Amino acid sequence: MHDIWCRPGPGAPWRIQVVLDESHVGAWTSRHDGRVRRPVHELGVLSAEGVPYLSPEVQLHYNGLGEHRYSGYR
């Protein structure tokens, strides 16, 4: 399992996605393409309000891997 999707109830829309990935010696390597690497401390960014989120270029890497497998989400 690499993705956990959360929502407040069975009929509610999905609200948050938690992506789980492995790292080794402080470095993340894409499980889809081993040439794509980044230090773990560069994977996330903080918003002006202090909310952490995945850096845009890493999110674009995941989005560019093909059509999303969850219905209703693009």
Image (cartoon, grey):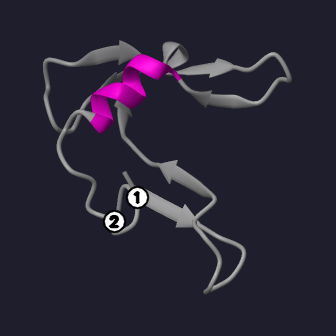
Q: Is residue 14 above or below residue 38?
A: below
Residue 57 placement (x, y as % from top left): 39, 18
- For the point 33% across and 65% down, the residue is 70
**Which residue is label 1 attached to?**
73
- For the point 17% across and 44% down, the residue is 66
Query: In this orientation, which residue lies closer to the viewer: 45 or 26?
Result: 45
Q: Amino acid at mark 1?
A: Tyr
- For the point 62% across and 30% down, the residue is 53
| Residue 58 falls inside the magenta stretch | yes
Q: Is residue 4 visible?
A: yes
Query: In this orientation, which residue lies closer to the viewer: 64 or 27?
Result: 64
Q: Which residues are magenta?
A: 55-63
Regarding mark 1 in the picture, which secondary structure is present there? loop
Mark 2 touching mark 1, by CB under 8 A? yes
Q: Amino acid at mark 2?
A: Tyr
Structural crowding at the residue carrying mark 2, measured as other residues with C-alpha within 10 Å and reported as few (<14), some (14–19) or many (≥20):
few
Tell which residue pokes out farthest to the right in this image: 49
**Which residue is label 2 attached to?**
70
Q: Is residue 5 above or below residue 28?
A: below
Residue 50 placement (x, y as % from top left): 82, 23
